Structure formats: C-alpha cells, structure tokens
Amino acid sequence: MIDYAEDYRKKRPTYEHYTARLSELIKTLLVGYKIKIHAIESRTKEVESFQQKMLKPEKKYNDPIHQITDLCGIRVIVYYVDDLMRVGDLLEKEFVVDLDNSSDRGSLLKPNEFGYRSHHYIISLKESRSSLPEWQTFSSIKAEIQVRTVLQHAWAAISHALQYKNNEEVPIELARKLFRVSGLLELADEEFTGIKKRGTEISANVATALSAGNLEITVDGDSLKQYIEASEVGAKITQLALNAGFQFPDEEVYDSLDDTEDPFSGLAWACNQAGISSISKLDEVCSKDLDSLSKFFRRLIIANDTQWYGTKPWFVQLAVMFACPKSFNAKVLLKKGWGKDVVANVIDSMSLKK
C-alpha cells in the first residue's frame, strides 16, 4: 500500500519552492496589470493537514497528491470589489484555470445565510511557461489562488477565530447578529467601490477644468497632483531646485513610497497651514519672486552637508513655505515630524529672504 503522506513529505520541498516562485510571479503580474493590492499571502500545506484531508470520510482519493488541488496556496487581498474580477481576468489570461474546481464562494450562499465572498481559482501553468527550463519542474502541479477584499478577509479571519465555519455551527441567538455583520461588511465593500468610482469621476472633472485654464478649484490631494504635474509654475520651481543642487530620488525609491509617504500630502498640509484653499491662490503665491526662491534653494543646499533629494510636490511645498514664512516656524515644522537639522536650515534660509 502506498504511503501517500510519506510520499508527500518527500515531495513537499518542491511544492514549497513552487509556492514561493508562484507568489513572486503573481506579484510581478499584478504590478504589470496595474492592480494595487493590500497583501499577498502564501502557504504550502503541512504533511499533517494533507493527511487529514486525504482521510476525510466524505472524500475518496486514488491519487491524493495530484487530486488535492490546494497543496500550494496563494491568497491575494485587494482593496475593492471590482478588483476581484480584475485579478480573476489576470489569472485566466496568464494560467490554465480549472473552472470545474474553481468557485465564487459568495455565490453559493443563500439569501438568508451569512458568510464572506471569496473567489477560489485552481490554476496550473500554461505550456508557454511550463516549457521554460526554470518552470518545468512544476508543470504538473496545481495551486489554489484565493482572491478577497480586505473586508472579506477580516470576516474570514474573525469567523475563524470564533470557530464558526458554517451556518449550522452557530447558536440561533448569535446567527442573526452574524448575518447583520456580514451584510454590513458586504455593504461597506460596495460603498468603498462606489467612493473610488466617484473619486475617478471627480479627478476627470478636475483635469478638464485645469486644461481649460480654470484654476478656481479647491485644494486637495487630487487637484494638487494634477496641477503640479501640468502647470508651468510647478515645472519652473522644480527646475530652480534642480539647478540649485537638489536631486530627484531614483525611480525605484519613488515608486516604493507607500500611502503614508504620499509626496502630495505634505504640500496639501502646507497649503492648509498657509491658508491657501484654491489652486488659483497657490498659483499666485508660487509665481511670485522666483529669483528670490532660487536663492533660497541655493542657501538650503549650501548649508546641507549631504546629498538632498526631493520630489516635485516637495519643491513646491518649499516654495509655499518661502512665500508664507509666518505660517511655518520651527515649532510647527518639528511637530510635523521634520528633523531638527532640516528645520534649522529651512528657518535660517527663510530668514535671509530679504
């Protein structure tokens, strides 16, 4: 009799290797398809879990290593419901998807049942990839790709912690509460997607207004980004900074900035601090006395003993600070989290404005 568990134990390193390679491949594909995700997780089924699944009385496996399709597992966690389908389209284009064994778990729920929507894809490599020497070892291995939103993942994690895997396990007095929570999370997912869609529409309206020369637009992250990227003033200020000795960070560093390091958030803060509420006012403030601004940039570089990197919105932020020095004292900048040496340099350089 074949000892399938021992056979899997010997083969598991190959499955681990495939899980790692597949995870990196999917990350690369997501970037290429411009799908922003919250996280990607991966795991290779433990031998004990394999054995437990193999011995389930409701299942019958003649060749469990090849019949159990989730020995390699990847979980892709996205932000929005519409990204679930985008990831699904990606998987169907780049891999062979076993449609008979893939599922949308949410579609299996009855209207009066609670649960989370999660798309499960059973995939294998296309011949165009599996024929490559570096992938040939994994040509016959299937993997399960789960795709969830952040809120779906939260539901799954908490449900797991509560140890309720299905409706039948839940005490009646708790079932109604769980059903309500499940509905609220699903509604929240839909609302977040709607907010994103509306944000895209607003962004398009801002772009149209700016291209028509209408600067009477409220300052926010989106309007600032579009104004700075398209305006002559933004380009002039950036060139002054580069001429003074500032440098752009390389593309890899710039692209690695996460949401907490959004280069436009500092500019939005500076505009608020200076009482600049419209793009027209920002344009007016930044257009004044560019010769003095150039000297300010040079003073900053001269007083700095290391290479100084900056982005276009940060250079404009410095221009706002230079034009409105009374709004930016040392205490304000330190509270914002600026380093003491940088604060001292900026304050000293602004004090020489005249």
Image (spheres, helix red, strand yellow):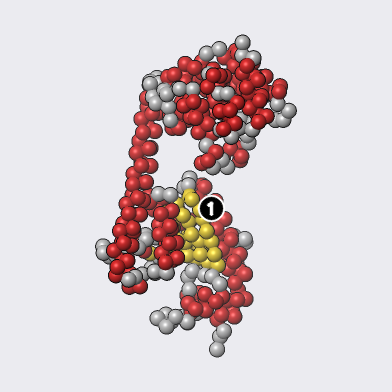
Q: Label 1, on which residue? A: 27
Give the residue furthest to the left: 111
**Residue drawn at the location 51% of the way across and 47% of the way down:** 32
Image x and y of residue 116, in percent = 37, 61
Coordinates of residue 45 in the picture (x, y in percent):
54, 70
Residue 86 visible (yes or no): no
Left or right, residue 116 beside residue 67: left
Comparing 94 with 258, the one in front is 258
Give SS at disc 1: helix
Name the outermost residue toward the right. 305
Give the residue drawn at x 45%, y 22%: 276
Q: Is residue 157 above or below residue 13?
A: above
The N terminus: image quadrant: bottom right
Residue at the location (62% across, 69% down)?
A: 13
Quadrant, the C terminus: top right
Residue 282: x and y, percent?
47, 20
Q: Quadrant of residue 331?
A: top right
The answer to whether residue 82 is seen in the rendering is yes
Q: Amino acid at mark 1?
A: Lys
Residue that lies at the very extreme toward the bottom in this rendered image: 1
Residue closer to the observer: 97 or 46: 46
Q: Position of residue 50 (x, y in %)?
A: 52, 75
The residue shown at (65%, 20%) is: 348
